[in-house]
Image (cartoon, rainbow, N blue to C red):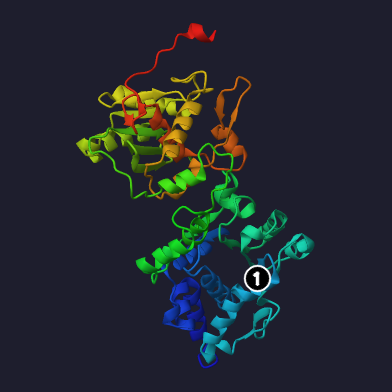
Amino acid sequence: MANITSQQKQSLLAAFKKDPQFFATTVFGEENALRPKQVEFFEKFLAHDHITFKGGVGFGKTRVMAILVWWALFCFNDVKVNIFGPSEGQIQDNLWNEVGILYGLMPEVFKEQFEYAASRAFRIGSRNECFATYSAANKDNLGTVRGIHATNNFVLVDEAADVPNEVFMNLENIMSDKNPKLVLISNPAKTTGFFYDTWEHPEINKAWAKVHGRMSDNPNMMPEKLEAFTALYGGKGSRQYRIMVEGEFPLDEVDGVISREHVIAAIENPDVFTPKDAPVVWGLDPNGGGDDRSTLVMRKDNRIIGIKEFPGFDAVQLANAIHSEFYSITNLADRPVEICVDANGPGYGPWNMLHNMGGLPIKKCMSQHSPTRDPLLYFNTRAQMWWEMRKWFAEGGVCIPNHPDLVMELCLPLYEYNAKNKILIESKKDIRKRGKRSPDFADALALTFLSNKTNVAGRFAWSKTIEYDVRCYE
């Protein structure tokens, strides 16, 4: 910048600040152009003050964080970029090493304006007002974490899944500054802790802008290479595959109703044969509009053939969407013989509207009522539908899509036997108390097992509701 006028310099910096892609290619070369997922990250950074970034490996999350460090030092005055991580060694070997590599790629006209050292990078002439540095984040240095302030106060937490919760509570102090940014980035290796909560806690996650990166987001990841990595990490659905390839949190509920191994075996199962004339049944889980989502799962015998999400739909919008899905979108051969709707609570309105529309094979399902089958075994209908779904998975020979939310949710609910030795499935309310999201997709699938008109894998054939002599149970 030394060979350009002050006006040209200001114009260039203004262009850099507005367009991070232009910055990356101008300063580090065309080979370091931001990939689509990296562009998405910068867009979220520009628009929000809380950003959480989960991802697998191989698509460039460390590189884009390093580009962000230099972009901040170029484009802002009175800026502090503090990088935290589980240990200084981890930061040195990963993110700070990338910062140094990028420094080496700068043309001399840019490089001469900055200095890069073992633990600090800064703008020459403003070393105390415009710098980036790093340190370990742990319970022993909370004072350091708490005392960070600047006009432009950018805090990056690398490998955030391994950083103690107390650190994040103190980092929130930066929000009193004029332009604060708190960025968490990590492989999603744990289902506990604050990083997990920024994605899955029903209240905490609302404050965070989210970026999710998969290995397949790398434009250079050819299908055969992705297939090799899939095998390396244990195959689709395995713990390491979900973390490293899909950038998803693992499944680890050991007391879950449905076995994780059974779910994994069913993901895109290539050996499943589904008869063409097998009936289709839909399960609809309405969730009240507003910020909630309603979900629809379509099952044809031993295979899920469709999944739909309706975020924020009220009762009227949802009923109209299902009506349109049935008559306008779904082929005649794939229309369901029954649409099982959870009519409890917020589901009553959509069920009532769909019922009154006429022509739709609507079944009213009351998940909190007494079971329709095996009343000595199940506490309520929710227990019945989930336990029959459990049997469906345990029998094998079923196929589900590699839908991240559905796969995770299937293993969420816990179960127990009550005082009368009846199966009781954890409620949505109790699941949310554990900081987990409501299993909306899994509940929609479970509802399909309340149908009386399907023939599921032989022994799940129900032509009518079983009648019980209640006198036997008095």
Image: 427 above or below 411: above
Residue under label 1: 90
Left or right side of 88 for 97: left
Residue 249: x and y in percent read: 54, 53
Q: In this view of the protein, which residue sits in the foreground, 108 or 2?
A: 108
Q: In this view of the protein, which residue sits in the foreground, 74 or 464?
A: 464
Count of number-bearing discs: 1
In the picture as drawn, the residue positioned furthest to the bottom comes out as: 3
Q: Is residue 242 in view from this perspective?
A: yes
In the picture as drawn, the residue positioned furthest to the top comes out as: 471
Going by the numbered disc 1, the residue's amino acid type is Gln
Where residue 102 sits, quadrant-wise, is bottom right
At x 51% / y 71%, what residue is drawn? 64
Q: Is residue 206 in view from this perspective?
A: no
Which image quarter is the C terminus in? top right
Residue 13: x and y in percent read: 51, 79
Image: 394 above or below 126: above
Image: 411 above or below 41: above
Q: In this view of the protein, which residue sits in the foreground, 164 or 12?
A: 164
Q: In this view of the protein, which residue sits in the foreground, 342 or 382?
A: 382
At x 52% / y 58%, what residue is drawn? 240
Where residue 100 sits, quadrant-wise, is bottom right
Residue 304: x and y in percent read: 35, 41
| Label 1 CA crowd tier, 10 Å (few <14, some 14–19, many 20+) | some
Residue 306: x and y in percent read: 33, 43
Image: 473 above or below 387: above
